[in-house]
Image: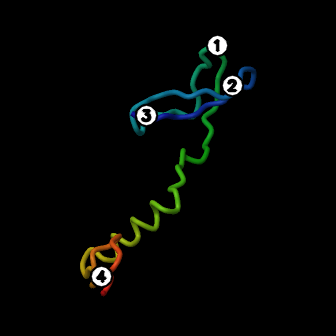
Amino acid sequence: MATYEYRCPRHGAFEVRLRIGEASASVPCGTCGGQAARIYSAPGLAVTPRPLARALDRAARTAETPDVVTRIPGRRPARRR
């Protein structure tokens, strides 16, 4: 199922859920029964937080050839006495 957006001249925009490919150029308005034209808008896009984007990029870069490390990440080097 996909969500399609239509606009009634009297009542404004509303959404209709239909099978993909079954959306027509117009549908009856649920409030007044008049014809509402299909409108095209940007899809709902989410913004990925920067720290997550950096982590995903780093994971993708090192998937085939991991970084060589000299100590366990997050631990401080041992103090020499």
The one of 34 and 50 positioned closer to us in this rendering = 50
Residue 19, numbered label: none
Q: What element carries label 4?
A: loop
Residue 22, numbered label: 3
In-image side of 11 versus 46 (left or right): right
Task: Mark 1 and mark 2 in contact? Answer it, CB < 8 Å.
Answer: yes
Sequence-wise, the earlier of marks 3 and 4 is: 3
Q: Residue furthest front?
A: 81
Select label 4 or label 2 by which is in front: 4
Q: Residues within 10 Å of mark 3 (few under 14, many from 20)?
A: few
Q: Where is residue 72 in the image (x, y as percent from the top left)?
A: 27, 74
Sequence-wise, the earlier of marks 1 and 4 is: 1
Q: Residue furthest right?
A: 10
> Residue at left 33%, top 80%?
77
Q: How crowded is mark 2: few (under 14 residues within 10 Å), some or many (20 or more)?
A: many
- Tell me where residue 33 sits by quadrant: top right
- Which residue carries the number 4 mark? 67
Q: What element carries label 1?
A: loop
Q: Which amino acid does label 3 sit on?
A: Glu
- Which residue carries the number 1 mark? 31
Q: What residue type is labelled 1?
A: Thr
Alpha carbon distance from label 1 to label 4:
60 Å
- Which residue carries the number 2 mark? 8
Q: Is mark 3 on a helix, strand or loop?
A: loop
Q: What residue type is labelled 2?
A: Cys
Task: Mark 1 and mark 3 in contact? Answer it, CB < 8 Å.
Answer: no
Alpha carbon distance from label 1 to label 2:
9 Å
Sequence-wise, the earlier of marks 1 and 2 is: 2
Vertical comparison of 59 with 52: above or below: below
Alpha carbon distance from label 3 to label 2:
19 Å
In-image side of 76 versus 34 (left or right): left
Vertical comparison of 79 with 12: above or below: below
